[in-house]
Image: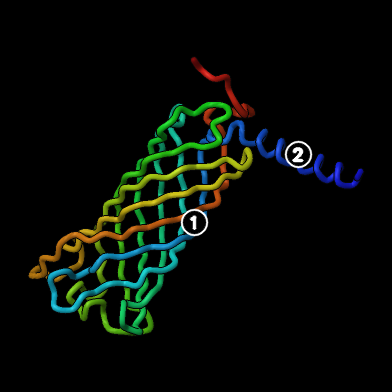
Amino acid sequence: MHRTFHLRSAALALLLATLAGSLAAQSHRAAITVTGGRSVHDDLTPGLAAPTILESGWVTGLQAEAWLGSGRVGVRLNGLYARRPLEDEAAEYTVTSGDLDLLLRLLPTEVGRWFSPYLAAGGGLTRYAAADSVAPIADGAYGEDPVRVHGLAGIGADIGVGHRAGLRLEVADQIVFPSIGESPPTVGLPSTHNLVMTAGLQLRLGSIWGRGLRGRPRTV
């Protein structure tokens, strides 16, 4: 009886401590996030006789961001890496991308705001490289070692689990522009899409409310 009571009391204390740490969950000035998830790809060469579709699968990445002013607007460096075969083929390719994004929080930064949705928009480069000395992707129609410009549009949410730790969930669409980048000039391929779904663990740094301040009163 007493043991059960003590266990319940300890669990309640842990929960309250977690919630207390979340009061300033979105007050950080900067963050580093390790991400992992899944990506799904369109046909890279639509219109050609044979499709070039990478299998869906795992993706991993790293993000570094800084929040400006009151914390509603931020800038982010976002990198992703995956290795996978084409559908119906054994040859594997690596997909490496990096982009610079603008982040916009949809809700004001306030004490008690443990859940903070945001929008992301930006652009960068994606490189499709043959692994293990296999033939270039799409037999060279997409370039020998193709690097492509892409845009990014996404929506996500940051979830506070402590003053210095957080979780991030995000779904983003990478719009790849095959006509921009290293490509044979005679190939006029249309834009394609990569759907990227990730979850991440954040290390949060600094405070938008000044050194030593963990929160501020709500504004009416």
Which residue occupies 25% across, 69% down?
146
Residue 174, position as x, y percentages in the image: 30, 55
Dot 2: element: helix
Q: Is residue 103 left or right of residue 25?
A: left
Q: Nearer the viewer, residue 68 or 150?
A: 150
Quadrant holding the N terminus: top right
Closer to viewer: mark 1 or mark 2: 2
The secondary structure type at the circle numbered 1 is strand
Residue drawn at 46 percent across, 62 percent down:
60
Give whichever of discs 1 and 2 has the lower sequence position: 2
Q: Please tell me which residue is depicted at 54% across the width and 20% down the height of the picture.
A: 218
For residue 73, above or below residue 1: above
Instruction: Residue under label 1, please give it.
Output: 35
Name the foreground residue: 57 vs 207.
57
Q: Position of residue 72 (x, y in %)?
A: 42, 31
Residue 110 vs residue 56, the one in the foreground: 56
Considering only vertical position in the picture, is 16 above or below 40? above
Label 2 is placed on what type of residue?
Answer: Leu
Q: Is residue 212 left or right of residue 83?
A: right
- Residue 184 at x, y = what percent? 13, 71
Report crowding for label 1: few under 14, some 14 to 19, many 20 or more residues within 10 A (C-alpha): many
Q: Is residue 180 above or below residue 69?
A: below
Q: Residues within 10 Å of mark 2 (few under 14, many from 20)?
A: few
Q: Work out whether residue 136 or residue 167 is closer to the camera in this orientation and state it.
A: 167
Name the residue beneath numbered marker 2. Answer: 12
Which three-letter amino acid code belongs to the residue tagged 1?
Thr
Image coordinates for residue 215, horizontal then vertical, percent: 60, 26
Residue 157 numbered tag: none
The structure residue drawn at horizontal position 63% and vertical position 38%, both measured from the top left corner, is 163
